[in-house]
Amino acid sequence: MTHTLGAGLGFKPEFAEDALAARDPGLWFEVHPENYLVAGGPRLALLEALRATHPLSLHGVSMSLGSAAPPDADHLRRFAALADRLQPALISEHLAWSRFGGAYAPDLLPLPRTTEALRQVAANLSRMQDALQRRVAIENPTHYLTLSHEWGEVDFLHELVRRSGCGLLVDVNNVFVSASNVGVDAAAWIDAIDGDAVMEIHVAGHRVDADATTGLLIDSHDAAVATPVWDLLERLTARIGPRPTLVERDGNLPPFAELSAERGRAQSVLDAETRALQEELA
């Protein structure tokens, strides 16, 4: 199946019938592999049916690349088996940790950007890529507090690419939310990232923390993409060119038609830049 990746959606079983029937040009679906690390059954059958008509992306949330210990061998083995079975168009993971001393936290926890952390993440990421025999895109995290860092975030990501050969997944909403929470310049971040390393882009919705005294924005994935995030997506795409771009929605799911319309807005951003590039070459 030949398919150019345009704008995609996070797959949810709640709209499986609509997803299987959709035929929008460029459409693809992202799944969290942790929900499908089984040997068979209806879950895998559904993904097999979906990938017959749409490319898939595996977006891991628990490899814990920022841990001091290497990735869990059994988890990595099952992840690799799923990738071999589904042959996804993209594989990605987070710059975060979730395991320590045999305990697992169901969250994407931040790490200080030290040289030692960089060495450890690069080593763990190399183990993951070796096991998968695939290049993995690493997502920039959301920040809620200021840690003691030795590296700026963009420089840290660029050095991680250099050391491991990985790619980058730029989550534009994470950039915007982090900029508000810890006082960085979102536009400067977007302008500084190396476009050649960017394999994928995410956009999503966020909300204001229920505790108004914190002043925090929460990367909640339970609302429509905000206007400033669309603006940053347009800014990034205009600079580096179109990349596969995912609209994430994990909570307060609207009807599929509404999600599809938001996905269409992302596709229009990619289409506009594609036309501009074609005009330059004409």
Image (cartoon, grey):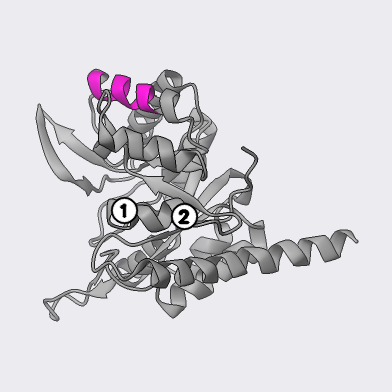
Residue 66 in view of the camera? no
Q: Nearer the viewer, residue 186 or 211?
A: 211
The residue drawn where x is 50% and y is 30% is 163
Residue 102 in view of the camera? yes
Residue 17: say if magenta: no
Quarter placement of the N terminus:
top right
Horizontal and vertical percent position of residue 157: 46, 44
The picture quadrant where one finds residue 78 is: top left
The picture quadrant where one finds residue 49 is: top left
The residue labelled by disc 1 is 12
The residue labelled by disc 2 is 21
Taking the image as shown, residue 91 lies to the left or right of residue 236, namely left
Q: Earlier in the sequence, mark 2 or mark 1?
A: 1
Horizontal and vertical percent position of residue 167: 52, 39
The reply to whether discs 2 and 1 touch (Cβ–Cβ < 8 Å) is: no
The residue drawn where x is 37% and y is 54% is 17
Q: Amino acid at mark 2?
A: Ala
Q: Nearer the viewer, mark 2 or mark 1?
A: 2
Number of residues whose C-alpha sits closer than 10 Å to that of mark 2, classed few (under 14), some (14–19) or many (20 or more):
few
Q: Which mark is residue 27?
A: none
Q: Which residues are magenta?
A: 74-82
Q: Look at the picture and state if 261 lies above or below 101.
A: below
Quarter placement of the C terminus:
bottom right
Horizontal and vertical percent position of residue 106: 15, 44
The residue drawn where x is 65% and y is 40% is 2
Number of residues whose C-alpha sits closer than 10 Å to that of mark 1, classed few (under 14), some (14–19) or many (20 or more):
some
Helix, strand or loop for disc 2:
helix
The residue drawn where x is 27% and y is 51% is 148
Q: Amino acid at mark 1?
A: Lys
